[in-house]
Image (tube, coloured by chain):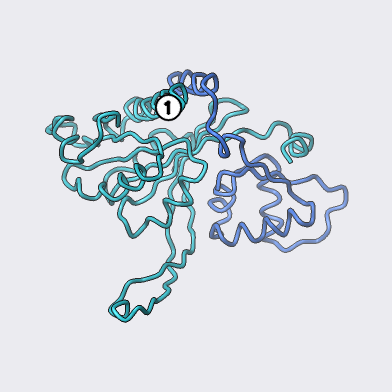
Chain colours: A blue, B cyan
């Protein structure tokens, strides 16, 4: 859900369905899957399917943070703490 | 993948996920909104669950499709770090959501409402069983600290190392303290090798 999605800029953009075009325009900058769902109004399951197709077509790339596979180390946690306190 | 993404659109931030669990009306959305840089975001997931009906007595299970709303917020700590807060109901019938939300999560906040402490029991059990680091925040939204933290700890049967604090979910400062408490707990786990 927090996996980041980024559109790959295309020199010649092929015609796409409006919902796909909407997703691609939102992902011009990195955006989480949950935010893509929130901003398009499509349910998460729908967004996941559309994104999977776009990944297969090379139109978007996705990245899941290493911190979701393993807990961040102590130095990272300390820096996160510091930043949260500064909010 | 990460490098490829970086080439096309600059740095892709690392993300931290925090789950905020609590019963209806406990103040989850309020807490998330107090911290989120954007208005609390809303998404929906269609879930298939096995419903328990009378037929179960005969071992027959029904599948029911339900739409579940998820509220979440975003905090950008810097260009390379983003924290997401996901609210989820704390009752057992939502446990199928907890599975997905806690996967890869840094930890969780159980937002307790002293009028309905029992709403928190199931999710606390879940986090304890799955070894998800969590803190309990008692939302004193009427501004009156009518409950002593120790009494709530006893009522929830919390183990000693579980941090418990009183908060006002409407206050950004107070909400921040809750998240700080959680990250400090995760840091203690990391340092102790837990």
Image quadrant in which the C terminus of chain B is located: top left
Looking at the image, residue B40 sits to the left or right of residue B142; the answer is right
Q: Chain of mark 1?
A: B
Residue B107 position within the rendered picture, expressed as x and y whole percent measured from the top left = 43, 36
The one of B39 and A32 positioned closer to us in this rendering: A32
Q: Secondary structure at mark 1?
A: helix
Q: Residue at x 38, y 29 (%)?
A: B182
Looking at this rendering, what residue extends furthest in the right direction? A12
**Classed neighbour count for the residue bearing mark 1: other residues with Cα under 10 Å, few (<14), some (14–19), many (≥20):** some
Q: Is residue A13 above or below residue A31?
A: below
Looking at this rendering, what residue extends furthest in the front direction? B193
Residue A61 position within the rendered picture, expressed as x and y whole percent measured from the top left = 73, 46
Image quadrant in which the N terminus of chain B is located: top right
Q: Residue at x 33, y 60 (%)?
A: B93
Residue B51 position within the rendered picture, expressed as x and y whole percent measured from the top left = 36, 71
Q: Residue at x 70, y 31 (%)?
A: B11
Q: Residue at x 76, y 35 (%)?
A: B3
- Give the residue number, with chain letter if any, for mark 1: B189
Q: Quadrant of residue B173?
A: top left
Looking at the image, residue B146 sits to the left or right of residue B82; the answer is left
Looking at the image, residue B187 sits to the left or right of residue B10; the answer is left
Q: How many marks?
A: 1
Q: Is residue B98 above or below residue B56?
A: above
Looking at the image, residue B138 sits to the left or right of residue B109; the answer is left
């Amino acid at each position: 859900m927090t996996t980041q999605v980024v559109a790959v800029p295309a020199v010649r953009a092929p015609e796409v369905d409006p919902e796909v075009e909407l997703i691609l325009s939102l992902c011009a900058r990195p955006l989480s899957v949950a935010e893509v769902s929130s901003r398009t109004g499509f349910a998460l399951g729908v967004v996941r399917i559309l994104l999977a197709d776009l990944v297969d077509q090379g139109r978007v790339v996705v990245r899941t943070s290493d911190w979701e596979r393993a807990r961040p180390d102590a130095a990272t946690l300390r820096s996160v703490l510091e930043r949260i306190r500064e909010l | 993948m990460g490098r490829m993404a970086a080439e096309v659109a600059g740095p892709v931030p690392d993300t931290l996920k925090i789950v905020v669990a609590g019963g209806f009306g406990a103040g989850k959305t309020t807490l998330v909104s107090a911290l989120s840089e954007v208005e609390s975001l809303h998404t929906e997931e269609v879930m298939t669950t096995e419903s328990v009906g009378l037929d179960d007595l005969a071992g027959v299970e029904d599948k029911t499709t339900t739409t579940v709303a998820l509220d979440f917020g975003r905090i950008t700590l810097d260009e390379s770090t983003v924290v997401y807060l996901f609210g989820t109901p704390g009752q057992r019938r939502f446990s199928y959501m907890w599975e997905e939300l806690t996967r890869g999560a840094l930890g969780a906040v159980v937002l307790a409402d002293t009028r309905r402490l029992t709403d928190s029991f199931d999710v606390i059990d879940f986090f304890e069983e799955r070894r998800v680091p969590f803190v309990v925040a008692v939302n004193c939204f009427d501004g009156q600290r009518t409950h002593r933290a120790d009494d709530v700890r006893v009522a929830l049967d919390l183990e000693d190392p579980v941090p418990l604090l009183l908060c006002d979910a409407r206050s950004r400062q107070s909400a921040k303290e809750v998240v700080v408490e959680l990250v400090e707990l995760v840091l203690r786990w990391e340092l102790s090798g837990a």
